[in-house]
Amino acid sequence: MIGTYSRLSRGLFTLYGVLILSFLYMPLLGTALASFSKKRYVSFPISQYTTKWYSKAYDSLTIAQLVETSFFVALAVTAICIVVGFFGALAYARYDWKGRRVFQKFLLFPIFFPQAVLGLALLLWFNFLGIVPSWKTAIVAHLVWVAPIGTLIMAIQAYSFDPSLEEAARDMGATRWQVFREITFPLLLPGVLSGGLFCFLLSWGNFPLSLFTTGADSTLPEWLYAKMIMGYSPLVPTVGTLTVVGAAVFILAGFFVVLLFKRVRSW
Amino acid sequence: MKDFFRSTGVICALPVVVLLLLVFIAPLFLVFGFSFVPARTFDLFSIPTLDNYQSIVTDTYYISFGWSLFLAFLAVVILFLICYPLAFAMAKVFGRFSIVITMAVVISLLVSENIRLFGWVLVLMKGGVFLGYLEHWFAVELESWLYGAPIIIFGLVYVYLPFMLFPLTLGISMIPNELRQAASDLGAGRWTIFREVDLPLAMPGILIGCMLTFVLCAGAMAEAKVLGGSKVLTMADEIETAFTYKQNWPLGSALSVILIVTVAGIALFTLRTIDLDRILGKTR
């Protein structure tokens, strides 16, 4: 019988999945281990463990500054992406309009685009417009890549709701704004939440776009890269681990909010 | 009613389209324009020249281009072979358990790619996690695998795995179980079902996965820099050097145009035949 699997083949598939997952998480584990090494230049096996790099990172003004920049960039990107992406998602999935197919494909291009090249093209563009790059231009740069992704995530949610609900409201005399406020928005809210979460984290972790568009400012991934390539600092594994932990906390919080939200709605 | 949906659609699409026209399409046109400006000048309105494109051939930049495409091709083949079994299991075997895998993969994706690559340096370097413990426990001393073309392919496979895995999973979940059952009832073996039923029906997902990973790999830079120790120069690497270190924007632009045309050509060719509604609407 096709479609049913013996316990053995199930087990083998599961084992394979676990193997791939450990492959994906291996370097994170390595980084986390290294962050507790006492020596300035890490070597394994670690002889002495310490948490001093964590307190150093905590006390460092540079790092505080980097966290602040990264955070505000990500926050601004998320806010804009939610608004733009929300409507984009409706146009993507919900409404039948001329040019929709072209729009759907057009939106995929920035996602496929080599990000380093995109960053450089934007640098050229800002220069041409006479804008001096700073963390504000980085927001624009992130938007090019993050907004289409946010739109797609929200579009997946938008595919799932029934168009006849909007039609019914319309037939009963609701205005465009009322349809939006009473029907469309509440139904799409879970997608907005997960879309927003993604936008924040993608901007928070983005490196190739920031590299060329932040000017004199710097984000966390940029600083990490600079220190990896030259002038190694023992804080690199520490800060790297901290950003991962930060992202994980954020995901859990988001997950919790969505769960809570579903509970409230089902009452 | 039709009218309402039509006009609402256009209004809704407007913000994101305007945004992308201003900060995606416009810069690309500027890059295109700059690729015809005489080398090492910054004035867009000078007499157009093809010198920059010529120097791609004469100054051996085409070698980097070849490397990028070659590495990307190998990475895509390896990715397909690695991801297909897992994608199949996620679509057809695991059931609810596949959500756990999806979540775990997505979360790893949200960690900045340079941290993950740096993690591999820590794992694979001399005195790293693998070699360090190997020496400590078994007294075996091996050369580090870092630096060179194979480790770059490894890095590409690692970083872009989710971009192959998810489209494949979507594609495979589009194969109706009844069809596979029918093929089996009619006496087809596993291999025949794979070749005659699974492959053709999952093709949209396979195409998207291969296209996506190829395009991303061809434009990648960090893998070659962090893991490859710049032993191999990739296209994106050359573009960056031209723009920053060499201060030769026209050359960088010309190189970018070649890369962009390749990428866009492949993407357009693949997307031409694919119905996005069917694939994305299926994900729930």
Image: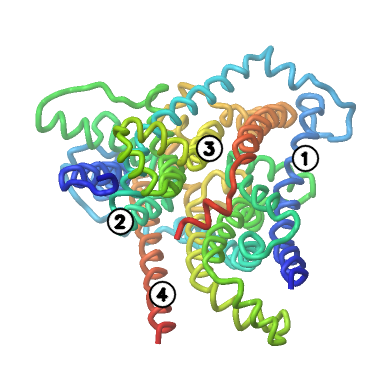
Q: Chain of mark 2?
A: B
Say whether mark 4 and mark 2 are on the same chain. no
Residue A257: image tag: 4
For the residues marked 1 and 4, what is the alpha-carbon distance in whole angstroms? 42 Å
The three-letter amino acid code for the residue at tag 3 is Leu
Whether residues under marks 2 and 4 lie with C-beta atoms below 8 angstroms apart, the answer is no
- In the image, residue A13 lies at what x, y percent? 24, 43
Q: Report helix, strand or loop for mark 4.
A: helix
In this view, the mark in front (2 or 3) = 2
Amino acid at the residue labelled 1: Phe
From this view, report whether residue A266 is shown above or below residue B85. below
Question: How far apart, in angstroms, are the residues tagged by discs 3 and 4?
Answer: 33 Å
Q: Is residue A8 left or right of residue B66?
A: left
Kind of element beneath mark 1: helix
- Give the quadrant of residue B250: top right
Classify the position of the N terminus of chain B by image quarter: bottom right
| Position above or below: A90 against A130 | below
Circle 1 chain: B
Which residue does the numbered mark 3 point to in the structure image? B216
Residue under numbered circle 2: B95
Between marks 1 and 3 in the image, the one whose residue lies nearer the viewer: 3
Q: Which comes before the other along the chain, label 1 or label 2? A: 1
Which circle marks residue B29 in the picture? 1
Question: Farthest residue toward the top?
Answer: B58
